[in-house]
Image (cartoon, rainbow, N blue to C red):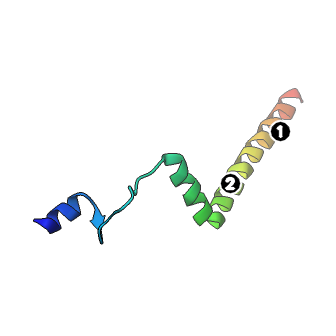
Amino acid sequence: MEYAKDIILEVKDGQVVKNKKGNIITRIAKGISNHKMITTIVMATISFIVIDLLLISSFVSVLMKI
């Protein structure tokens, strides 16, 4: 019975364990700080895609004027 209460109330060695879920902004910030290389690669890829789209649209507009 005591063991079941400890599991339900998340008590470990007489101390209450903090909630693991936390704030979503804190979780995202922690994920970014833990995975810096992946975050850098994703951000660079997104920026290159945006630049590519801008260049293609500019090129098409130049072709339309000819």
Image: 15 above or below 56 = below
Q: Which residue is mark 1?
A: 59
Image: 14 above or below 28 = below
Residue 8 is situated, as x and y percent measured from the top left of the image, at 21, 58
Other residues around mark 2 within 10 Å, as few (<14) / some (14–19) / many (≥20):
few
Q: Residue furthest front?
A: 14
Q: Residue at x 67, y 61 (%)?
A: 41
Residue 35 is situated, as x and y percent measured from the top left of the image, at 59, 65
2 lies left or right of 30? left
Q: Which residue is mark 2?
A: 43
Q: Closer to us: mark 1 or mark 2?
A: 2
Other residues around mark 1 within 10 Å, as few (<14) / some (14–19) / many (≥20):
few
Q: Secondary structure at mark 2?
A: helix
19 lies left or right of 62? left
Q: Amino acid at mark 2?
A: Met
Residue 66 is situated, as x and y percent measured from the top left of the image, at 89, 30
Question: Between 59 and 9, which is closer to the camera in this rendering?
Answer: 9
Q: Where residue 1 is drawn, which disc sits there?
A: none
Q: Amino acid at mark 1?
A: Phe
Residue 13 is situated, as x and y percent measured from the top left of the image, at 30, 72
Q: Residue at x 68, y 60 (%)?
A: 40
